[in-house]
Amino acid sequence: MNKRKQEYYEIIGWDERGIPQSSVLKKLGLIDVDKVLEKVRNK
């Protein structure tokens, strides 16, 4: 199950913790969300 979840995250552009990658958020125009999640990604 974990392997499938990781494969899914990779396909949709999320990291291994299920947090959207910066590039995905920027494509969607969610720059403000990206700035907030940057703090979470760096932990």
Image (cartoon, rainbow, N blue to C red):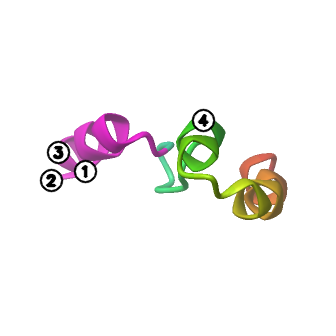
On screen, residue 39 versus residue 24, left or right, reads right
Q: Amino acid at mark 3?
A: Arg
Q: Amino acid at mark 1?
A: Lys
Q: Compute the Cα span from label 2 to label 4.
A: 26 Å
Q: Residues within 10 Å of mark 4 (few under 14, many from 20)?
A: some
Determine contact: label 2, label 1, CB under 8 Å.
yes
Residue 29 position within the rendered picture, expressed as x and y whole percent measured from the top left: 62, 53
Q: Mark on residue 4?
A: 3
The segment highlighted magenta reads 1-14
Residue at 46 percent across and 45 percent down: it is 14
Q: Compute the Cα span from label 4 to label 3.
A: 22 Å
Q: Residue at label 4?
A: 23
- Viewer-closest of 19 and 17: 19
Tell me where residue 6 sits by quadrant.
top left
Tell me where residue 12 sits by quadrant.
top left
Residue at 35 percent across and 35 percent down: it is 10
Q: Compute the Cα span from label 3 to label 1.
A: 4 Å
* Mark nearer the N terminus (1 vs 4): 1
Tell me where residue 19 sits by quadrant.
bottom right
Q: Compute the Cα span from label 2 to label 3.
A: 5 Å
Residue at 58 percent across and 42 percent down: it is 21
Q: Which element type, helix, strand or loop, lies under badge 4?
A: helix
On screen, residue 20 versus residue 29, left or right, reads left
Q: Residue at label 2?
A: 1
Determine contact: label 2, label 3, CB under 8 Å.
yes
Determine contact: label 3, label 1, CB under 8 Å.
yes
- Depth check, mark 1 against mark 4: the one in front is 4
Q: Residue at label 1?
A: 5
On screen, residue 29 versus residue 13, left or right, reads right
- Depth check, mark 2 against mark 1: the one in front is 1
